[in-house]
Amino acid sequence: MPILLLIRHGENDYLASNKLPGHYPNIHLNDRGRAQAAELERTLNRLPIKAVYASPLERAVETAAPLALSLQLEVHLHPGLVDINVGVWTGRSWKVLNRTKSGKIIQNTPSQFHFPEGESFVQVQERVVTALDAIAVAHKDDLVAVVFHADPIKLAVAHFLGLPLDHFQRLAVFTGSVSVLHINGASSRLLALNLLPPFSFPDLKYKL
């Protein structure tokens, strides 16, 4: 079964200002985000990566592009990897949301929350896991880079480790980070979480 490099996209001005980007188009990497994408390329380009997938949102595509170019691969866009649809909260402040009753539910019992006119965390987890399962089937014994978003990555990791959804907020996934997941059904294993480049892969090379 494949090993997936779950890569969070680089920084952008929406994140820097603590706003919820949701599905807004035309949110591009800022200078720090472009530097993070370049560092990811330098760190990962020597690995035997066979495919690169990304969320169709620009911030993910722009993070994936330098690595794909270096590896002479195309970036496969997968709609199932898109960020959470935060509905009416799109473009609003995380700080404001966290002061509301909804913010407390999101932090403590996110399985019970549904963004008004958007998605629930349960729905996001289901679609992201479906997308990663499809990628795993298409790349049975490969190393694959998958570039997408913080909450979808954390929700996926929680699922494959058998963690309750309500605990997914305990995981940390920073911009420009890599988490390494070996997909193998009920025996899936998290090999690394929230690695920030530059780093090496001695254990991963052994497994490959």
Image (spheres, rainbow, N blue to C red):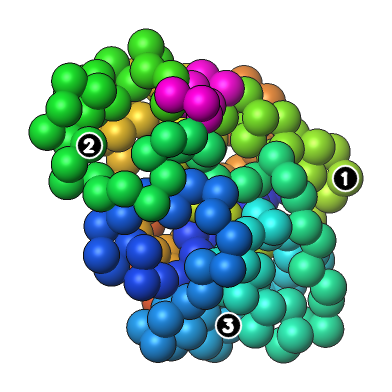
Mark 3 or mark 2, which is nearer to you?
2
Tag of residue 138: 1
Distance, label 1 to label 3, CA atoms, is: 23 Å
- Give left or right: position of 88 versus 127: left
Q: Residues within 10 Å of mark 1 (few under 14, many from 20)?
A: few
Q: Residues within 10 Å of mark 3 (few under 14, many from 20)?
A: many
Which of the marked residues, 1 or 3, is nearer the chain's N terminus?
Answer: 3
- How many numbered dots are placed on residues in this image? 3
Q: Is residue 207 visible?
A: no
SS state under label 1: helix
Name the residue that disc number 3 marks.
41
Contact between marks 1 and 3 (CB within 8 A): the answer is no
Q: Which residues are magenta?
A: 116-123
> In the rendered structure, which amino acid carries the disc numbered 1?
Ala
Which of the marked residues, 1 or 2, is nearer the chain's N terminus?
Answer: 2
Distance, label 1 to label 2, CA atoms, is: 39 Å
Magenta segment, prevailing SS (helix, strand or loop): loop
User: Nearest the camera: 168 or 183?
Assistant: 168
